Image (cartoon, helix red, strand yellow):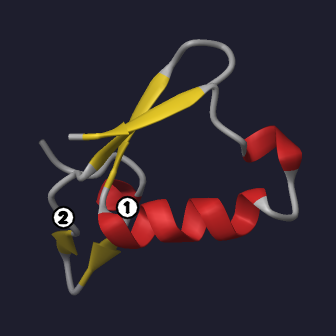
Amino acid sequence: MNCQSCSSIIMNGERRTRPAVARWTHWHDNTTLLCQSCLDAWFDNADDDESLEPKTWRWL
């Protein structure tokens, strides 16, 4: 399972693939798999934007 957040990033013609470490469940019940760096960034951004706070999250 790879991170769904950074998998859309293409560097040097290759898609970035990082292993997911957490499953983030949004308030509308969709989920996103996140690598460690995306999880850290999401928590940092959620400090300023409450809409980014998860309904739940857990380690994989």
Marking on residue 18: 2
Q: Dots 2 and 1: beta carbons under 8 Å?
A: yes
- Residue plotted at (44% across, 26% down): 31
Counting residues from the N terminus, which is met first, the one under dot 2 or under dot 1? 1
In terms of secondary structure, where does tag 2 sit? Answer: loop
As drawn, the residue found furthest toward the bottom would be 12
Element under disc 1 = helix
Residue at 22% of width from left, 69% of height from top?
16
Image quarter of the C terminus = top left
**Amino acid at circle 2:** Arg
The front one of 49 and 60 is 60
- Residue 11, horizontal then vertical, whole percent: 28, 81
Amino acid beneath label 1: Cys
Which residue carries the number 1 mark? 6
Viewer-nearest residue: 11 or 53: 53
- Tell me the quarter of the picture where residue 8 sits: bottom left
Q: In this view, does 22 lie above or below 8?
A: above
